[in-house]
Amino acid sequence: MMSQTDLIHPGERWRDTDGQPIQAHGGGIIEADNAWYWFGEDKSAPTILNERGTAKVPFQGIACYRSTDLITWQRISTALSPVPDDPDHPLHTNKVVERPKVLFDPHEQRYVMWCKMGGPNYEYMHLGVATSKTIAGPYQFIEAKAPNDNRAGDFALLRDRDGTAYIIHPTDKFKVMIVAELDETATRLTGNLHRCLEGDGGYHGHEAPTLFDYQNRWYMLTSRVSGWKPNPCRACVADQLAGPWTVLGELCDIDQTETTFDSQPACIWPYDPARGRFIYIGDRWNTADLGDSRYIWLPIVWKDDIPHVRWLDAWHPEDDAAWVV
Ligand code: GAL
């Protein structure tokens, strides 16, 4: 019998092993050394308004948490730290640095972290990259720029089945999704890219791409573009990353909340991919206090071969019943 503390409680305050609220917003997870590592935005400082009136927390760093059960998390580091004494640096505290994603580079035997670099007011829409020999960092910043000269924003970082790393990000006012190839060190763009979902039925734009690979098909969930406000996320499917992508629809809400249970996708964790068990990981943004934004971890369930996010008040990934509609 699992106790309440062994369960995931979507939307409730989630504390680390020191009793502090977990600061891993817009996060990404990777597995290494028989443990899981959760990287995310540390938004523990007070929320302020930027010059455009958008809520922001000056960059506090990218936090790294470690767990061996996906429920109990220990903060082990600030993996990427702010640069406080150079206001022009992309990591200065006046900037917005979001949505960190990490992967391992076997070529250089090091970890590579990519982040969305918004500048002080989200005017840059760059992506930044940093590396570390150890998973927890400190990560050494390399550079931030517009990938392939495209405005970026939210992005996904992954490896295709052949091991090639890609960044997936929206551009052209969020109307196109770019699948951009990275080199063998995963720190540089090769310039090879695919423009996906172009002319997508006049779609109002998409961001927060999160992808997973199931039965030789890639699935992509995206949010619409409404800043911190939640909206219905949409599912697309393709046989290969380059597409063509087929829109499955805005159907991630079995219960029709039309807000993806008041959340926006951050990443998807392949918990038991052979059995189609993927965990949706989203953020329920709280613009009054961004550091108190809650995590929405929910099972992705399948109905007619289409992925849906299913609400549960409390659940455990080992509980088979969680995965059945
Ligand atoms: C969202 C984005 C978030 C954050 C927010 C700021 O569209 O997904 O990561 O940048 O805008 O308004």
Image (cartoon, grey):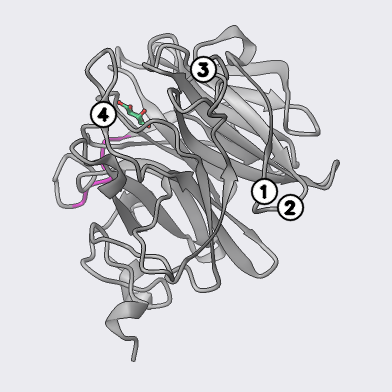
Screen quadrant of the C terminus? bottom left
**Measured Cα–Cα span from mark 2 to mark 1:** 5 Å
At numbered mark 2, what does the secondary structure look like: helix, strand or loop? loop
Do the residues under discs 2 and 1 have CB atoms within 8 angstroms? yes
Residue 172 sits in which quadrant?
Answer: top left
Q: Measuring 23% from the left and 41% from the top, which residue is drawn there? A: 289
Whether residue 318 is visible here, answered yes or no, is yes
Q: Residue at x 35, y 46 (%)?
A: 44
x, y (%) of residue 89? 57, 19
Image quadrant holding the N terminus, namely bottom left
Write down the residue under mark 4: 48
Q: Check disc 1 and report its element: helix, strand or loop.
A: loop
Residue 263 falls inside the magenta stretch: no
Whether label 2 lies within 8 Å of ligand 1 gets the answer: no
Q: Give the residue at mark 2.
A: 134
Q: Looking at the image, which is closer to me, 251 or 112?
A: 112
- Which residue is tagged 3? 87
- Relative vertical location of residue 156 with respect to residue 72 in this rendering, above or below: above
Residue displayed at 51% across by 25% down = 92
Asked whether residue 196 appears in the rendered view, the answer is no
Label 1 beta carbon within 8 A of ligand 1: no
Spatial CA span between label 1 and label 3: 23 Å
Q: Which residue is mark 1?
A: 137
Mark in the foreground, 1 or 3: 3
